[in-house]
Image: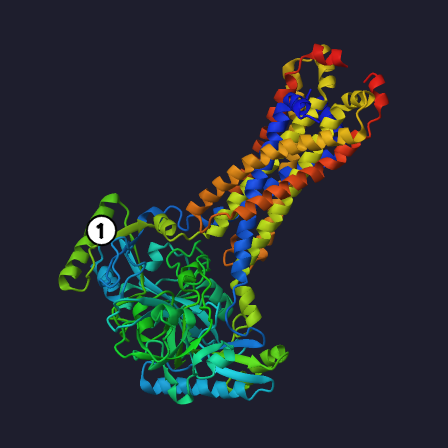
Amino acid sequence: MFGYYLDMALRSLKRNRMLTALMVLAIALGIGASMTTLTVLHVLSGDPMPGTSQTLFYPQLEPRDMDGYQPADDPPDQLSWIDGMNLLHAKRADHQALMTGGTVPVQPTQSSVDPFYSDARYTTADFFPMFKAPMRYGRAWSTTDDDSKARVAVISSKLNDKLFSGKDSTGQTLQLGDAAVRIVGVLDRWRPNPHFYDINISGSYSPTEDVFLPLSTARDLKLTISGMMNCWGGHNDNLEIAPCTWLQFWVQMDSPIKVAAYRDYLNHYSQDQKALGRFQRPVKVRLLDLMGWLDYQKVVPSDVRLQTWLAFGFLLVCLVNTVGLMLAKFMRRAGELGVRRALGASKRALFAQLLVESGVIGLSGGICGLLLAFLGLWLVRQRPSDYATLAHLDMSMLLTTFLLAVGASLVAGLLPAWRACQITPALQLKSN
Amino acid sequence: MTVHPILAALRRHKAGVVLIVLQIALTLAIVCNAVFIIGQRIERLNRPTGIEENDLLRVSQAWVGAPSGDDAASVEKLDELQRADLATLRSLPGVQEVAASESMPIQGMIWSGDVTLTPDQKGIAVQAAYYYGDEQLRPTLGAHLIAGRDFSASEILHHTIRGTGASPVIIVSKPVADKLFPKGDALGKTVYQDGKREPSTIVGVVEQLQTPTTDSWGNPFAYNSILEPVRLDGVMASYAVRTQPGRESDVMHEARKALFAANPMRIMPDSWGVQSFSDIRAKAYRADRGMAILMGVVCLILLGVTAAGIVGLTSFWVGQRHRQIGVRRALGARRIDILRYFQIENLLIAGVGVVLGILLAIALNLWLMTHYEMERLPVLYVVAGVLVMLVIGQGAVFVPARRASHVPPVVATRAA
């Protein structure tokens, strides 16, 4: 029976080629646009640390003086050196790492490669186990290395490919300007998206850094730091004591009890600092988990959200358009349907027949829409934004597209088919 | 012609009418808001920077193996490197002016702070971007000096960004001057920067100078700029170069070659080494332009789909009423009457659609205002949108309506 319905549907669709093309195109454009924008949104709002993100927390303190104080002020997004070091050394969480971004001049030993600047991350030993950074060769540095300002580095696989053509480079020397450090580990491919642990650096979706150094070593070597820095209450040339926030601090805790205890600890710490006169504002602490932090920082660009809404509005108009046209088309065939009813076809059979016809439209629209989505994502990848390279259709989005196409075709077909079945055969036969 | 028979006929196509009304309403709501967003973006990317943008280059580079700048001797060494580069650039053929220039408008690299009338930072505080550079910076950028004077060469200091001393003299943009001294007597007055103890005297006022950032956090002080008489020392140094008219691309090419010939121990990537100001402008507003184009394309397709929908639906109705039209013609209706019938029918449908659309457009705008940085939709956009929708409706209905008017009266006498 299905084959027969399909044959009739195709005949009917062929009779109005332009109209069929219009309906398919409208659905395809709607689905293509929605899927492109939804995929970008999905990629950008994804969890950078699936499985671990709910155990990672970002503590915030309020260390500023009373200048320009507003009770509703949020605590600063980063920590000062003194607070960062205090929290780091207190070791109240399972893991903790203090960090900042920087750039380092890399001087390759081989003369064939020109010197270049690499993005660097100056951090502490727990960074690697806490963020599950995979190692290809060697290992991360230890807390002892942190304390002794050891001249050690972990490099990315990309840099390893560039400098050592992918071979195990542990033990080799990396020349950073006039300082030399020993490579102790090489990361495997690792790119959490967004670049959650520091979103102040250019672009929240940047790739991970190429050079990782102990924070103490980087300070000792006076390497350039980069990122956001906020200062208050007068200037101070020495960043170690300056009233400036410029460090990110992450902690890992695996149970809600520990989280509550840590929050208490932050409160106590702030009160102590206030008693000492270092903090002046009323105590305000915050301990957001990873996804909460990304949400609070509004990491997903608002333009991307806006585009997604726009695309779904567009899809809605396209669907309404198709429903209207399909309805008009079916109603026009009332005579033909009346004859079929009079000859014994049940309402259910007519409904099935019309649904097959609208299904063909919806499905072709969906398939064309999928192709358009691939095209759309290709266009997004050509754009020079930092997230461009991430815009790919994954399995879950492919499935969503398929469901959206089927859903759209059903929505577009159900109402017209149902309406067309309601005709009374006698009336139609008579009027003809 | 009365509308009564039209309404009676439409009542027989309720579902179709509702759908086309809905489609027109949704299209109007989306298009009005999208066009408004496009307008805002275009306004944004057409903002003037206040400088002469033609024949202007930014040269940026970083020295390899340069001292860190943590002690006086290494600061001097860095400054020596910087002065050597300035001389190299100045000697190039086709170059008019060269200046040490840490940042440029809309370029992205920004230092900012608060300027107050007293050292304890009480009272009026004006947030402003700091343009560090030498005495050539203002003329090289081509910012228009409306009061006072430029820096003299002897006033130029040099230190690293963390240098603690205040600049004894500064040049401010007019908005900064007006906010600090509403009476318009800023020239010669002293202000304090970031709570530093030493005052800074305003020696000049420039008419307009946009800050280096185009990010939304910089919007509240987009034109608050201060020129600081400081050659900033660091491992990275940037220069502003004004070329003779039309020599831009030659100088871009020569500057790189000359700097490397003078001192090869430096890094100048293609992406930010030598850029013309038009490159900087294109990069700064890339996202806005992309968004405007996307919105524009979506609007056009939406209008096209809606027009096609009206054509399709009306064609069906014409086909369905073939015989009735014949009867009307046989009873004496002229072609123009038939044409008018379909045109008025469309006007009624589109009229209901746009009324609903206006409400939807306002609702959508209110929703966008609560969730995104959006302003209230001006009435003009809605009125224009309504007119466009009505015109599109009439345009779309014309072809099928004319076909209807060509139905010969004789059809009435034939059995269908």
Q: Is residue A39 above or below residue B279?
A: above
Residues A170 and A405: in front is A405
To which residue does mark 1 refer?
Answer: A262
**The N terminus of chain A sits in image quarter:** top right
Q: Would residue A8 be found to the left or right of residue A172 on screen?
A: right
Q: Which residue occupies 57% across, 84% down?
A: B95
The residue shown at (76%, 29%) is B337
Question: Residue at horizontal 39%, vertical 89%?
Answer: B154
**Tag 1, which chain?**
A
Residue B124 falls in which quadrant of the image? bottom left
Task: Give the quarter of the figure containing the C terminus of chain A.
Answer: top right
Pick the front one: A132 or A368: A368
Tell me which amino acid carries mark 1. Answer: Tyr
Query: Is residue B44 at least partly visible in the picture?
Result: yes
Q: How is the image coloured?
A: rainbow
Q: Is residue A114 visible?
A: no
Q: Position of residue A214 (x, y in %)?
A: 33, 67
SS category of the residue bearing label 1: helix
Kindly indicate the quadrant of the structure image that contains residue A367: top right
Q: Position of residue A143 (x, y in %)?
A: 27, 64
- Counting from the top left corner in percent of width and height, residue A39 is at 52, 46
Residue B87 lies, with reference to residue B275, above or below; the image says below
Image x and y of residue B257, in percent: 57, 82
Does B99 sit above or below residue A183? below
**Residue A168 in the figure: left or right of residue A405:** left
Q: Nearer the viewer, residue A304 or B94?
A: B94
- Could you tell me how many numbered marks the image carries? 1
